Image (spheres, coloured by chain):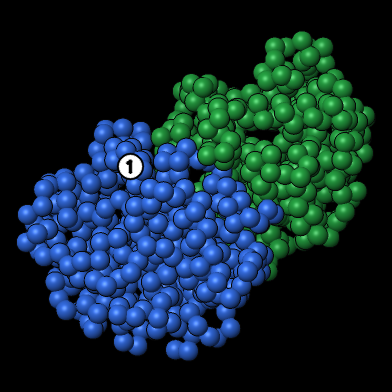
Chain colours: A blue, B green
């Protein structure tokens, strides 16, 4: 199989785009990544999107997005994997190049939520849970995370220690031009915000944002940022069916496979992006990636290790909490940010000498997860 | 890149399954294909499905379906491409094996529509058209097909000649155990059925059916049924944007690419499955595949050539019209049927000495299309 590298990165700020259709967001990010790659055409496009069928009443989104580029005939595939759509689409796009079927592939994640009623978005998020056993009860995504959060608090950490996940993400977002909320947030502010789903405070949840991010993939040539490992895994969709509800097995098995492919251990990783759509999910993402032992994720988050100068910087542009979380696009934002770090193009967010970065992007309550490992080729 | 073969085929009858959840349909077809392949596990599953987000309020369907197999940890990807979901998912599944990322891949298409209000299904079908320029007008999928149908009649054929597409599909379905409507239908009966969207009669439209079909893909070994060519293409989503509304360019460009990959010409093909969700679409599918010249598809359908003993048998198990059309599963049914023909397992439907078969599976009004070519390896 051919090795694959990232040849271009493009994204728009996560924000509220009341005046633009989803096509415009998609095309803008896509054109930027093509420009960054110095190309004006690709062989294929992958579109990652979670809620277009609900939010824009749009199916067949890949064709509609390809049309927005003005390139009839372009092969196009839409991937939907809940919040993991971006990471899974990247995995599939890598395969398209690795197989030799395509020589230049674009993967663009896009999501538009701002102009949708909040209750529809809440419904959409819950639709990533199994409908007949979980979602039909009316439980929200925050409600499920709250149960996990409480169990974690009972066993391992104080509310403040878990909440620090959100605080750290905001700290990293300061100055980030593409972040939706690029400001510091104090622990006290977060802990005194209203309850979203007890014990999760509103300021521990990622917000609703529109966005699009795009990457260009081509065969590797021993320069730039390579895809060192890529894997997708699943788990029982219901947390009640799992032996240990605090063990996110889909994250762990995907990470194990991606590390094996990259021939690395967790300790080799220089930076990580984790899915902190809720503070507890960020903590469990860190544990699932093997960056901290089970039950020790919150402790790691409360140390200097996850800071920009630390041993393993996490969410260096603000994560889902502060950069923003445009669902199906989020996984691509994570990988775009890691690519910038490895290219030395992270500006004020640059961490020193980054060689290996990992992104954890999960859907549902980790019923599906994509883990992708990027590596600077000159390592 | 590795060559890929079909190692197993499984499907259930297209029907109305009021007593079974979508999980059961999925698992039943999947278990059958694994049994047919003589394996009890796969490396990865692709789930093709069009309307689950609307019909079952279910996103993240790949994880939910993987869960139904009782195999946590299985990598799973959902592909949605409107009615072309099956053919596009097959294309992606082939890449997974070709790339070397997976050694045994299952691709299972599933759709459950019977227990959904017909107007919701109609809405869902229209959602494959671009929402802001086409679907919002309230035009139905049948309405768009009707415009194309009328233009074709004005230029090339009588209403009866187009209608024969549906008559022939029903003729081929007789005795088919997995067909929803395995009976003959006379031209007179079809032409005297009520108008669905003038000039399309009700009996020229495929019905609504539940179904699931599954294929197992493994590296090829010069035996059995190989994937000779596979391609996806797109076109302007709006028929008003196309130079010639009767030229289905997404079909044509996908066919050109798939034939090139398979190193064949249209005249080398022994049998074809085309997307006859409306009679006119079947006719244009035949033309798009190059089996008849533009404007001559209806004439071909009215000849003996498309019959079981003819030069180029079309829809040998009844096509969408008579075998049934469970949207996201349809593309997999087409390929399963071709595989059976090439394996000599088509029973009463067997055509003599079939070596190369092609399936055309399009979404929207051919805004996206997958063309897949299968070949008997001993050819």
Where residue A248 sits, quadrant-wise, is bottom left
Residue B341 appears in the figure: no
Residue A192 rendering spot, x and y as whole percentages = 7, 54
Q: Chain of mark 1?
A: A
Residue B68 rendering spot, x and y as whole percentages = 43, 42
Q: In the displayed structure, would residue A200 be above or below residue B277?
A: below
Q: In the displayed structure, would residue A37 be above or below residue A162?
A: below
Q: Is residue A39 left or right of residue A244?
A: right
Residue B254 appears in the figure: yes
Instruction: Name the residue carrying label 1.
Output: A121
- Residue occupying the point 35% across, 59% down: A14
- Residue occupying the point 22% across, 75% down: A306
Quadrant for the N terminus of chain A in the image: bottom right
Q: Is residue A182 left or right of residue B311?
A: left
- Residue occupying the point 53% across, 85% down: A223
Q: Residue furthest front?
A: A19
Where residue A104 sits, quadrant-wise, is bottom right
Q: In the displayed structure, would residue A377 be above or below residue B318?
A: below
Q: Residues within 10 Å of mark 1 (few under 14, many from 20)?
A: some
Which sits in the foreground, B203 or A258?
A: B203
Q: Helix, strand or loop at disc 1?
A: helix
Q: Is residue A330 left or right of residue A91?
A: left
Q: Is residue A294 left or right of residue A97?
A: left
- Residue occupying the point 72% across, 48% down: B250
Residue B83 rendering spot, x and y as whole percentages = 61, 38
Quadrant for the C terminus of chain A in the image: bottom left
Which sits in the foreground, A182 or B115?
A: A182
Where residue B239 sits, quadrant-wise, is top right
């Amino acid at each position: 199989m051919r090795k694959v590298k990232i040849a271009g990165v493009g994204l728009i700020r996560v924000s509220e785009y009341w005046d633009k259709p989803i096509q415009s967001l998609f095309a803008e990010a896509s054109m930027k990544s093509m420009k960054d790659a110095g190309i004006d055409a690709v062989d294929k496009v992958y579109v990652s999107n979670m809620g277009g069928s609900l939010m824009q009443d749009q199916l067949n989104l890949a064709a509609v997005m390809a049309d927005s580029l003005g390139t009839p005939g372009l092969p196009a595939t839409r991937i939907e994997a809940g919040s993991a759509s971006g990471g899974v689409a990247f995995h599939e796009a890598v395969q398209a190049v690795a197989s030799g079927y395509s020589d230049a592939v674009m993967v663009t994640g896009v999501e538009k939520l701002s102009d949708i009623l909040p209750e529809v978005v809440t419904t959409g998020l819950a639709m990533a849970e199994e409908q007949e056993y979980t979602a039909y009860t009316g439980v929200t995504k925050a409600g499920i995370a709250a149960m996990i959060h409480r169990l974690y608090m009972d066993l391992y950490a104080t509310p403040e220690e878990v909440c620090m996940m959100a605080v750290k993400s905001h700290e990293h977002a300061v100055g980030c031009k593409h972040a939706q909320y690029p400001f510091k947030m104090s622990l006290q502010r977060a802990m005194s915000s209203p309850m979203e789903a007890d014990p999760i405070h509103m300021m521990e949840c990622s917000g609703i944002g529109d966005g699009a991010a795009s990457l260009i993939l081509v065969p590797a040539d021993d320069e730039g940022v390579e895809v060192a490992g890529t894997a997708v895994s699943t788990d029982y969709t219901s947390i009640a069916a799992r032996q240990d509800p605090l063990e996110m097995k889909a994250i762990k098995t995907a990470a194990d496979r991606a590390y094996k492919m990259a021939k690395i251990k967790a300790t080799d990783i220089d930076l990580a992006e984790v899915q902190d759509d809720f503070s507890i999910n960020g903590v469990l993402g860190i544990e699932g990636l093997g960056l901290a032992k089970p039950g020790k994720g919150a402790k790691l988050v409360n140390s200097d290790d996850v800071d920009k100068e630390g041993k393993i910087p996490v969410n260096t542009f603000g994560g889902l909490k502060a950069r923003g979380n445009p669902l199906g696009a989020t996984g691509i934002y994570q990988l775009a940010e890691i690519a910038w770090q490895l290219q030395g193009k992270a500006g004020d967010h640059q961490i020193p000498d980054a060689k290996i970065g990992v992104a954890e992007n999960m859907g549902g309550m980790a019923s599906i997860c994509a883990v992708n490992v990027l590596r600077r080729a000159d390592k």
